[in-house]
Image (cartoon, grey):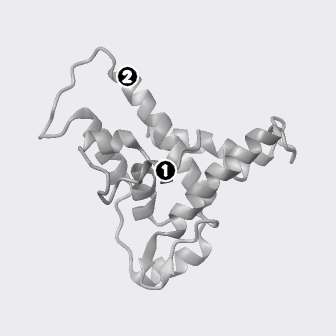
Amino acid sequence: MGSVIGHEMTHGFDDQGSQFDSTGNLANWWSEADLKSFKERAQCVVDQFNSFEVEKGLNQNGKLVAGESIADLGGLVVAYAAFQKAMEGKPRVTIDGFTPEQRFFLGYARGWATNMRPELKRMLVTIDPHPLAKFRVNGPLANMPQFAAAFQCKAGDAMVREEAKRCVIW
């Protein structure tokens, strides 16, 4: 649930929400340097999602899903920080072979578990500003070194982006 709350909060600072000031007016309130940096970082997310193949010859549209993807990443990062804070001073109990950190990430992924027909995927990729559920999991998690550490993933593993290609917005 923390990632959902963080996701919605992050929308205030995504590719669209960042264009409105504190009173809801369409106005740039960012410094030139901050806006330039944000756009560069957001482009990383666009490029990452453009690379996700839905089926042969059809990829996710990174520009279309940028806002939701930025919010997913931001929300998950905020939720993980809150989770770590909540765990301070508490025993790290392994349950059913999973550490608390692993259970956090598994819980996030399980929340996106879906099954849909290829026809629906093809349609959604062309009109929906939300990425397909699979990519809402794989995208943010591949950008989080905390995920790789929790599951002992190594450089070159499927869910580990090279440090130079890792998307970090905030």
In front: 50, or 16?
Answer: 50
* Image spot of residue 140 (x, y percent): 45, 51
Pick out the residue farthest to the front: 164
Residue at mark 1: 164
Residue at mark 2: 86
* Image spot of residue 44 (x, y percent): 58, 56
> Would you place residue 38 above or below residue 63 in this image?
above
Label 1: element kind: helix
Instruction: Residue at 44%, 76% (x, y): give it.
Output: 54
Image quarter (top left, top right, bottom left or bottom right) of the N terminus: top left
| Residue 78 in sight here | yes
Instruction: Residue at 38%, 29% (x, y): give it.
Output: 83
- Name the kind of residue labelled 2 in the image: Ala
In the picture provided, is 157 more to the left or to the right than 53? left
How crowded pointer 2 is (Cα within 10 Å; few <14, some 14-19, many 20+) is rated as few
* Image spot of residue 105 (x, y percent): 33, 44
Instruction: Residue at 54%, 44% (x, y): give it.
Output: 168
Image quarter (top left, top right, bottom left or bottom right) of the C terminus: top right
How crowded pointer 1 is (Cα within 10 Å; few <14, some 14-19, many 20+) is rated as few
Quarter of the image where one finds residue 91 = top left
- Name the kind of residue labelled 1 in the image: Ala
